[in-house]
Each structure stands twice: as structure tokens, then as C-alpha cells.
């Protein structure tokens, strides 16, 4: 049954724009998230965001009926959600699209995988049913990411009148790698997305990879149109936010931690395997080894937001990052120089402080849908910043010309790129920062979202 308050624009994603925590006295506190979709969606009226309840606080909020206006959280059984999100989305689909498997050992698709796959189907069905219920006649529904790849096909069967779009925020795997998946599962995923009127990606490269998979495996993309929308940095928000008092405070503290007259190499990521933090530290160690003139004259600020810690492999990766940072500090550090300043904590104000201070930004992912840090640093930078950028980040298509580009697996070349970046004359660095900021802000989030909506409705 279609709801009485049917919306005309609907967004569906696993993680929603708000989350809740429950205090010991039972009271609920809400926290709003940021990101491209949140600011993008602020440009439209008559909208609904359908997302999953992810925490006990979220589930309690659903039970008490306190969800925010314009947001519907789905109270999906916690075990089922864990199988779909941790088991399939983050341990299989994320690994495939980011090419993270170490193939002699993994993957091995077995009965446990099939059980989790059934949960992934049920979780996608819950979204499709909620969207079918909430969408007004002929409404536009924008389904987000690999978590919900089956939703477009399922929703099309329930509501043929809707305009359905799917957007992938990740890379898409090349066909030979995509074929690691069991054949029926690969086909189901492609057909799920092809249930949309339009499937869109962050770069041409990922769109072409998707088309390649559809062509090889299914013989084509059928009636689904393919689009590319390269999300840019939100310049107005970043410039304002990065000059608020809490950022200034953190800058002062960070300057103290770095020490006087030192250059900074900054990285800010989720604590995420695909971000390649370990090889980044290895490159920094190689820089100190090969170019001893930088010892005591540079500090590497590495900030990471804790992420996906329910998965053992993420815990192990976090431990590897911490151990290597400690080793570098033990090997090279002096009483008044800490070579690596590593913090694993959720603190956006501190990230902005690091952006402003950065002489060099290191963005070296193994693969990345876009990488917004690469776009945010040049916008916020106080004194210009050189970007050392992986050619495997989506942002490379737009920022490659003004960056120092690296192969993310080549630790020695990354160390040389850091040396080159640190040595760059001030004027060249200023010119490059200007060029980077212009390219990075070409498609602000609201326009990015409106373009997708318009293209979907045009079809
Ligand atoms: O890139 C895909 C994505 O869903 C992003 O939108 C986001 O940065 C990240 O993954 C968040 O992951 P999670 O919701 O698992 O913390």
C-alpha cells in the first residue's frame, strides 16, 4: 500500500543522515552526519531518506517513533543486518570492487557465504518494500551503493511507475576480477542494478568497468542508461567550517605537537584497508632513510576515523598501522621530534586543522571511488599544499594534472614523490594548489545531486 504522505524524491542508503545513542538514563541523543548526499539532498523538497537502523540507539529511536522528519529508518533484525552488511557488503562486495583479496588464500565461496547472501537478499527486499510503500506516483528513487545493488530490480517489480536510479560510490571491478564472484551471484548483482532506469558512477573509468561486466556476462546493459557524476568538494561549507574556533584550537595544539619550523605530510582517512595507510608509512620511512636531510625537519600527521571494527581484518590492519608508526618513531624519533603523529579518532575539526597546516597531502589508495580528502585539502589549505595522489583514486581523473602521481604499490616511488613534494618551490606549490582547488570544486554536492535527478527524470 502506498503511504498517504508519499514523497516525490527518495534516497535509499545503508547509512542514513542521522544516528542515535541511548544514554544510561534511557534518553536518546541524535547526531547528524555530513557528506555529499546530505548537502546534495538539501537542495530538494518533498523528499524522504530511507536508511537502516545501525545501532541499538537507532533501533530504540525507531521503536519510540522519534525518527527525524524526512527520514525513515528500517528496523532490520540485527543479525540479518550484520550478515548483509559485514558479511556480504563489506567482506565480499567491497573487496571485489577495491580488488583487496589476496587470491591464493581468499575468497572461498562456501555454504556460509550462501547463508549470508540470503540475508543480503532479505535486507535488499526490506528496502525495496519500504520504498514501494513511501514513493508517490512516478516519484524519483535514488538508490545508493553496493549495499543495495538488488533494490532497483526488486523495486521495479513492485512499482513499474517509478523512475529508479542507482549510484555507486565505489570503484567498479574490471570484469576478470568481478568474475571471482560465483556466476549466479555476479549475474544477480548486475541484473539488480540494471533494474534501474539509470546507473551512475563517480568516474568514466568505473562506468566503463560496469559496462564491461554487463557486456561480457549478460551481453549488454539493456535499457538502462549509464551516467557519470564526479562529486566535488563543498567549498562554502569547508571554508566556513575550517575557520571556526574549535578548528583554530586544534591547529594550535597540532602545531605544538609537530614542533617549530617543521614541514608536514598529512593524511586523513577512514581506518580502511583500501586507503593503503601501511604503504604510506613505509614510504615515509623510506624517505627518512634515503633523504636523511628531512630527519627532524618533517612530521607525518596520520589521522584515521575508526571504521568497520566488527571485522577482524580491519582490527588487524589498525594494529599493523599502529605498530609500524611506533617502529618509525622508535627508530628515528629524538627527544623533541616525533616523526609520525598518528591518531585514530573521530574528530572532523582536527582533520580540518591538519588540512590547513598541510605542506604535503598524501592520498595513496589502492583503489578509491573518488577520495574527497584529495579535493578538500587544496580548498582549505592556508599556505598551499602539494598533493601526492594515487593514480587509482577516482579523483585522479580530475586532479592528476596538478598532482604528483604515484602507483600506490610502489613504496620507493612514493618516497621519491614525497621528497619532490617537500622540495617544491613555494610559487609552483601555490599555482598547483589553485588549480587543484578549481578542479576540486567544479561540481558541488547540490549540483551533483540535482544533475542526477534531472538526468533521471529526463529519460
Ligand atoms: O564509498 C562507499 C561508502 O559507502 C561511502 O559512502 C562511505 O565513505 C563509506 O563507504 C562508509 O562506510 P561505512 O558506512 O561502512 O562506514
Image (cartoon, helix red, strand yellow):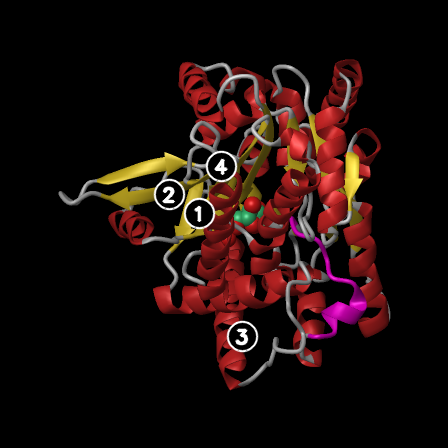
Q: First in sequence: mark 1 or mark 2?
A: 2
**What's the distance in space between the residues labelled 1 and 2, CA to CA?**
16 Å
- Give the residue at mark 4: 333
Q: Residue at x 81, y 29 (%)?
A: 402
Is the residue at mark 3 in contact range of ligand 1, meaning its CB lies under 8 Å from it? Answer: no
Nearer to us in this view, 291 or 455: 291
Image side of residue 231 versus residue 50, left or right? right
Q: First in sequence: mark 4 or mark 2?
A: 2
Under circle 4, the secondary element is loop
Quarter assignment of residue 458:
top right
Mark identifier at residue 19: 2
Nearer to us in this view, 347 or 80: 347
Under circle 1, the secondary element is loop
Q: Within the magenta stretch, is there residue 171? A: yes
> Residue 449 location in percent, x, y?
66, 35
Q: First in sequence: mark 4 or mark 1?
A: 1
- Give the residue at mark 3: 117
- Give the residue at mark 1: 306
**What's the distance in space between the residues labelled 4 and 1, CA to CA?**
26 Å
Q: Which range is magenta?
A: 169-180
Asked if labels 2 and 3 touch by Cβ distance under 8 angstroms, the answer is no
Nearest to the eye among marks 3 and 4: give it. Answer: 4
Mark 3 is surrounded, within 10 Å at the Cα level, by few (under 14), some (14 to 19) or many (20 or more) other residues, namely: some
Magenta part mainly helix, strand or loop?
loop
Q: Residue at x 29, y 49 (%)?
A: 57
Q: Is residue 274 visible?
A: yes
Mark identifier at residue 316: none
Nearest to the eye among marks 4 and 1: give it. Answer: 4
Q: First in sequence: mark 1 or mark 3?
A: 3
**What's the distance in space between the residues labelled 3 and 2, CA to CA?**
26 Å
> Residue 370 location in percent, x, y?
69, 43
Query: On screen, 110 above or below 45?
Result: below
Amino acid at each position: 500500500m502506498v503511504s498517504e504522505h508519499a514523497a516525490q524524491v527518495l534516497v535509499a542508503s545503508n547509512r542514513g543522515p542521522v544516528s542515535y545513542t541511548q544514554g544510561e538514563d534511557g534518553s536518546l541523543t541524535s547526531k547528524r552526519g555530513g557528506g555529499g548526499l546530505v548537502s546534495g539532498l538539501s537542495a530538494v523538497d518533498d523528499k524522504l531518506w530511507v536508511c537502516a537502523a545501525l545501532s541499538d540507539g537507532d533501533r530504540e529511536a525507531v521503536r519510540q517513533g522519534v525518527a527525524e522528519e524526512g527520514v525513515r529508518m528500517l528496523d532490520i533484525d540485527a543479525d540479518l543486518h550484520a550478515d548483509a552488511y559485514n558479511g556480504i557488503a563489506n567482506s565480499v562486495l567491497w573487496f571485489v570492487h577495491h580488488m583487496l583479496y589476496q587470491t591464493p588464500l581468499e575468497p572461498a565461496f562456501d555454504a556460509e557465504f550462501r547463508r549470508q547472501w540470503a540475508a543480503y537478499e532479505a535486507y535488499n527486499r526490506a528496502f525495496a518494500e519500504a520504498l514501494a510503500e513511501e514513493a508517490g506516483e512516478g516519484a524519483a528513487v535514488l538508490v545508493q551503493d553496493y549495499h543495495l545493488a538488488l533494490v532497483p530490480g526488486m523495486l521495479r517489480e513492485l512499482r513499474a511507475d517509478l523512475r529508479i536510479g542507482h549510484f555507486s560510490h565505489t570503484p567498479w571491478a574490471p570484469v576478470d576480477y568481478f568474475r571471482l564472484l560465483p556466476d549466479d551471484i555476479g549475474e544477480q548483482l548486475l541484473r539488480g542494478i540494471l533494474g534501474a532506469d539509470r546507473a551512475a558512477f563517480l568516474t568514466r573509468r568505473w562506468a566503463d568497468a560496469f559496462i564491461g561486466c554487463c557486456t561480457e556476462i549478460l551481453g549488454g546493459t539493456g535499457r538502462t542508461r549509464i551516467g557519470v557524476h564526479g562529486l566535488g568538494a563543498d567549498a562554502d561549507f569547508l571554508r566556513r567550517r575550517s575557520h571556526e574556533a574549535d578548528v583554530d584550537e586544534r591547529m594550535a595544539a597540532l602545531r605544538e605537537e609537530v614542533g617549530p619550523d617543521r614541514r608536514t605530510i598529512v593524511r586523513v582517512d577512514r581506518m580502511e584497508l583500501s586507503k593503503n595507510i601501511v604503504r604510506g608509512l613505509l614510504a615515509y620511512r623510506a624517505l627518512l632513510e634515503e633523504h636523511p636531510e628531512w630527519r627532524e625537519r618533517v612530521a607525518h600527521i596520520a589521522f584515521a576515523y575508526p571504521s568497520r571494527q566488527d571485522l577482524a581484518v580491519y582490527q588487524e590492519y589498525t594494529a599493523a598501522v599502529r605498530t609500524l608508526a611506533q617502529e618509525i618513531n622508535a627508530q628515528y624519533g629524538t627527544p623533541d621530534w616525533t616523526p609520525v603523529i598518528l591518531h585514530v579518532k573521530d574528530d572532523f575539526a582536527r582533520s580540518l586543522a591538519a588540512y590547513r597546516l598541510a605542506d604535503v597531502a598524501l592520498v595513496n589508495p589502492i583503489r578509491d571511488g573518488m577520495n574527497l580528502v584529495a579535493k578538500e585539502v587544496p580548498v582549505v589549505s592556508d599556505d598551499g599544499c602539494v598533493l601526492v595522489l594515487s593514480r587509482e583514486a577516482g579523483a585522479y581523473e580530475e586532479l592528476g594534472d596538478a598532482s604528483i602521481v604515484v602507483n600506490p604499490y610502489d613504496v620507493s616511488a612514493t618516497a621519491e614523490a614525497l621528497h619532490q613534494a617537500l622540495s617544491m618551490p613555494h610559487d609552483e606549490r601555490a599555482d598547483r594548489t589553485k588549480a587543484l582547488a578549481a578542479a576540486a570544486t567544479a561540481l558541488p554536492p547540490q549540483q551533483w545531486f540535482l544533475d542526477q535527478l534531472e538526468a533521471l527524470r529526463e529519460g
